Image (tube, grey):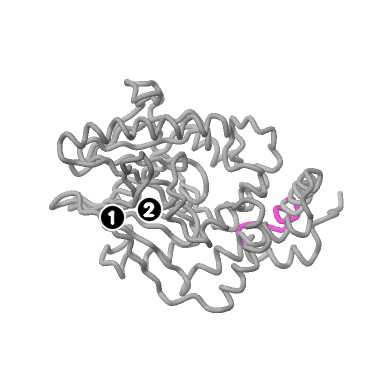
């Protein structure tokens, strides 16, 4: 079969992002990508724009790596011995890092392409490196939440379905969208372009419910350095096997990608984050369930916050993307702690022009 849409020019542009592929794998990727473009064209999308959006994944990730890497972070002192650092990279999900005398615990692990950037960032912030990480808790199997797990000194804690998704190579597991090809090509593109470092081993969560929190089964518990995380199983709106983590003593709810504080995302993060909507039509494998989950999470968050207020505390919602937030009097997300910008250097005009071009191409469709 010959490619109709994936031109030699496109192949040359994305080849630098396919560093883990041999020639046969590259050929298969181009053929699969061509079929994906064909499917999107049948939905009324322009083939040249589709190829540009695919290429822009690599352009954005590599353009914001190295000297151009930056982080917006919140340093939240939980006790004399425990500090939560919630850190937003240029693209992808937040990394939530607990700093304790017993070592570090991470919730989610960012893109693999930024591993060296994170090492420099942690050192600059006085956090050392990842060598003393004792736990890596992953909310779900998208590359921006599991991408560095293969570089960590301990296996990641994941839902069994997340292990299946990573081993099978497609986020379409249990999807109701009937877009298997698009999901497969998108997963391969992002995993490869972002240099996902696959773990060799996993720590699998339990799956039998211990009790319920609202509509969510509590299926496991993680204890570390005086912290106690309840592990909640999602209903699978965003991705099958997605987990939420709740620490009741200090009042932290990690909502993964079920609840995001969009108002705190920069324009560039919003544009980059809209790419899945363009290439796979929706970021959720079941949008109806995703909306229901968010409604129930916010309802439950309000109830938990009311209980914590009786003890003089507040519930912090640690989102998959965006700033750690509390609920305001109207039940909306409001930034809880100061956000500090860390950057190795200011963006160049060239990068500004690039992102403006990305914005012009795709922002008009979904922001």
Left or right: 100 in relation to 148: left
Left or right: 307 in relation to 189: left
> Vertically, is 42 above or below 63?
above
Residue at x 43% of width, y 42% of height: 256
Marker count (numbered): 2
Q: Is residue 100 magenta?
A: no
Identify which residue, 127 or 358, lies in the foreground: 358
Left or right: 282 in relation to 42: left
Residue at x 71% of width, y 56% of height: 26
Q: Is residue 24 magenta?
A: yes
Furthest residue toward front: 330
**Mark found first going from the N terminus, 2 or 1:** 2
Instruction: Classify mark 2: helix, strand or loop.
Output: loop
> Vertically, is 167 above or below 197?
above
Marks 2/1: CA–CA distance: 8 Å
Q: Position of residue 134 (x, y in %)?
A: 29, 48
- Dominant secondary structure, magenta: helix
Residue at x 27% of width, y 51% of height: 98
For disc 1, the marked residue is 337
Specify start and end residues of the magenta stretch as a single range: 19-28
């Amino acid at each position: 079969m010959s490619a109709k849409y994936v031109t030699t020019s496109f192949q040359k542009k994305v080849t630098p992002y396919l560093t883990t592929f041999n020639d046969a794998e590259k050929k298969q990727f181009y053929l699969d990508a061509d079929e994906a473009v064909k499917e999107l064209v049948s939905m009324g999308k322009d083939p040249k724009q589709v190829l540009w959006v695919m290429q822009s994944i690599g352009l954005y990730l590599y353009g914001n790596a190295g000297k151009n890497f930056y982080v917006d972070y919140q340093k939240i002192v939980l006790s004399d011995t425990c500090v939560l650092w919630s850190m937003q990279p240029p693209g992808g999900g937040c990394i939530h890092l607990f700093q304790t005398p017993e070592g570090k615990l991470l919730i989610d692990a960012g893109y693999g392409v930024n591993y060296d950037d994170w090492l420099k960032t942690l050192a600059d912030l006085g956090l050392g490196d990842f060598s003393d990480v004792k736990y890596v808790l992953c909310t779900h199997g998208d590359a921006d939440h599991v991408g560095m797990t293969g570089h960590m000194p301990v296996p990641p804690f994941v839902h069994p379905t997340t292990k299946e998704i990573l081993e099978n190579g497609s986020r379409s597991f249990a999807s109701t969208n009937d877009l298997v090809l698009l999901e497969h090509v998108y997963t391969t593109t992002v995993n490869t372009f972002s240099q996902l470092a696959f773990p060799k081993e996993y720590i699998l969560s339990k799956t039998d419910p211990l009790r319920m929190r609202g509509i969510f089964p509590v299926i496991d518990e993680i204890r570390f350095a005086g912290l106690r995380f309840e592990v909640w199983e999602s209903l699978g709106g965003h991705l099958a096997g997605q987990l939420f983590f709740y620490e009741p003593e200090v009042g932290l709810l990690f909502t993964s990608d079920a609840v995001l504080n969009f108002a705190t995302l920069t324009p560039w993060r919003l544009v980059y984050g809209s790419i899945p909507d363009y290439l796979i039509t929706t970021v959720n494998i079941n949008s109806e369930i995703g909306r229901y989950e968010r409604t129930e999470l916010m309802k439950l968050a309000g109830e938990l916050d009311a209980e914590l207020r009786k003890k003089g505390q507040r519930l912090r919602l640690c989102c998959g993307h965006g700033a750690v937030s509390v609920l305001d009097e109207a039940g909306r997300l409001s930034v809880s702690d100061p956000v500090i910008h860390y950057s190795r250097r200011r963006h160049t005009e060239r990068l500004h022009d690039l992102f403006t071009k990305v914005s012009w191409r795709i922002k008009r469709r979904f922001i």
